[in-house]
Image: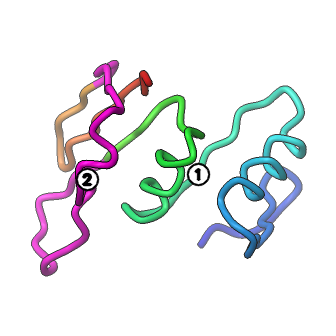
């Protein structure tokens, strides 16, 4: 984990993603909010309609079964528009979320 400093602070929120995004947006004022997490966090944010862009990094390492990003049909109405692709040691995909 990066060290907290004048430019980077951490706040742990335990009452849901909606509250976390609201607190982060208030703290950022006119700035943007980025959330770093795994598939479960992304799924919660997508379900809540709180995602403008989705950035996925895929690494060519097999660590086990993992977590399916779209495990059921409940996220299928979400449309993704690819806005970026970088291929190297990892594949980085960027999507704009269209509901």
| Residue for point 44% across, 24% down | 99
Front residue (pair 29, 15):
15
Rendered location of residue 73, percent (x, y): 24, 49
Is 26 drawn above or below residue 53 in the view shown?
Answer: below
| Residue for point 42% across, 22% down | 98
Rendered location of residue 69, percent (x, y): 27, 56
Q: In this view, does 65 lie to the left or right of 40?
A: left
Is 37 drawn above or below residue 34 in the view shown?
Answer: below
Q: Mark 2 points at which residue?
A: 70
Rendered location of residue 46, percent (x, y): 47, 45
Q: Residue 99 carries which label?
A: none
Check the image and tell me how it is coloured. Answer: rainbow
Q: Give the range drawn in magenta.
A: 57-84
Q: Main secondary structure of the magenta part?
A: loop
| Residue for point 81% across, 61% down | 9
**First-in-chain label (1 vs 2):** 1
| Residue for point 33% across, 44% down | 75
Label 2: how many Cα within 10 Å (few below 14, some 14–19, many 20+): few
* Total tally of numbered discs in the picture: 2
- Does 98 lie within the magenta span? no
Q: Nearer the viewer, mark 1 or mark 2?
A: 2
Q: Give the secondary structure at mark 1.
A: loop
Q: Give the secondary structure at mark 2.
A: loop
When asked about the image quadrant of residue 40, the answer is bottom left
Name the quadrant of the N terminus.
bottom right
Is 12 drawn above or below residue 51 in the view shown?
Answer: below
Q: Name the residue under label 1.
A: 35
Front residue (pair 33, 61):
33
């Amino acid at each position: 984990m990066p060290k907290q400093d004048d430019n980077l602070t951490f706040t742990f929120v335990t009452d849901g993603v909606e509250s976390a995004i609201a607190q982060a947006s208030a703290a950022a004022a006119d700035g943007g909010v980025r959330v770093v997490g795994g598939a479960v966090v992304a799924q919660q944010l997508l379900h809540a309609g709180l995602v403008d862009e989705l950035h996925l990094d895929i690494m060519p390492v097999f660590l086990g079964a993992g977590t399916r990003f779209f495990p059921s049909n409940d996220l299928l109405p979400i449309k993704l528009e690819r806005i970026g692709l970088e291929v190297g040691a990892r594949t980085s995909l960027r999507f704009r979320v269209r509901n």
